[in-house]
Image: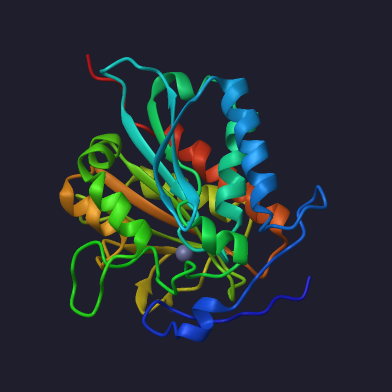
Amino acid sequence: MQERVTLIRMDENQHTEDAGRKSWTWVLPDGHASNDWSHYRRRLATVVTRQGLESITLGTIAGEPLLMLRAGTAEPGAPRLLLASGFHGEEPAGPWGVLEFLDATDGDLLSRVQLTILPLVNATGFRAGTRFNAFGENPNRGYLGLPGESPSHEGLLLLAHGELLLDAACDGLLTCHEDVLLSHAYIYSSEHTAEPSGFSHSLLAANAAHFPLHPDGIVDGCRVTGGIVFNHYDGSFESWLMQRGAARIACVETPGQHPIAQRIAAQRAMIEAFLACAPAKQD
Ligand SMILES: [Zn+2]
C-alpha cells in the first residue's frame, strides 16, 4: 500500500472556519454513508434495547438529542469509566466504533465496570460530516475558560452536567477521535505520573495493531514520543475532567487516510482495551 506520511495537520490552532466546515464522508462496509445519522440512531436504538442499556437524553441541540447511555454493573465498588465519542463530525470511526463495541460485547468486559457512554456528542457535525457543529463551533474547546475560547452548545450542555460526568469518569475517561489528514496513529493521554503507565501503553498497542504509529516529533502542535502525547493540557473536554479529578484520561486518534472499516475496528479494540485495564474493584 502506498502510504502518505504527513507531519503537518489541521491542528486545533490552525483550524480555520473553512476547514471546520469542510465535509468528509466515507462509505461503510454495509453500504451506508459514514454520516448517515438516521441509520446510526436506528442501530443504536436496537443495541440499547438488546443489551438492556439505560438511555438518557442530556438535552437537545438544533433539534438533535445528546444521548448518554449507562452500561455494566450497578455495583457501587466497580470502577466508574466514561467513554465519549463524536465531538468532531468529520471523525466518524469513533461513534461507529462505540456502536460496534456495544453490538459485539458479550458482557464479560462490561460486568466489571460501571460504564457511562456519550456515543455521539456532535450530532449536527456528524450529519454534515464537518468537524464543527451547525453553529460553526468546535465542541471540544472552551471547557476551561481559556483566553479566546468559549464553550460550544454541546460544551455548555456537558458543563451543565459536570458533576454527573466527573463522577462517571472518576476512574478513567476515553474519548475517540480521528485525524483525517494523517496516515499514522497516536494517542493523547494524561495520568498523575511522570511517565505513561500500562493504561496508556495498552491503548497505544491496540491502535498500533491496526496502523503504523506517528514518528517522534510534533503533532497537533504537541510533542509526540513513541506514539503518545503525554500530559498535555488545553481547553478540551479531556483536560477539563482531568483537572476536575478524573484518575486518567486518553484521547485516541485513528488516521483518516486508512479505510473506514479498519478505523472502526481500531476504535472498538481501543474501547475494549480501556475496559480491560480498568482498576480492580474496590471493596
Ligand atoms: Zn477530534
Q: Residue at x 60, y 40 (%)?
A: 99
Q: Is residue 103 shown left or right of residue 134? A: right
Count all numbered tags in the image, as a single digit.
0
Q: How is the image coloured?
A: rainbow
Which quarter of the rendering shows the C terminus?
top left
Observer-nearest of 63 and 282: 63
Q: Is residue 190 shown left or right of residue 96? A: left
Q: Residue at x 31, y 27 (%)?
A: 79
Whether residue 208 is visible:
yes
Q: Position of residue 38 (x, y in %)?
A: 67, 48
Q: Residue at x 56, y 55 (%)?
A: 208
Q: Position of residue 261 (x, y in %)?
A: 72, 53
Q: Position of residue 212 (x, y in %)?
A: 60, 64
Observer-nearest of 190 and 66: 66
User: In the figure, residue 245 lies in which quadrant?
Assistant: top left
Q: Is residue 50 shown left or right of residue 125? A: right
Residue 170 in the image: above or below residue 256? above
Observer-nearest of 193 and 8: 8
Q: Residue at x 62, y 42 (%)?
A: 41
Q: Residue furthest right?
A: 31
Whether residue 106 is visible:
no
Which quarter of the rendering shows the N terminus?
bottom right
Q: Position of residue 50 (x, y in %)?
A: 62, 21
User: In the figure, residue 111 lies in which quadrant?
Assistant: top left
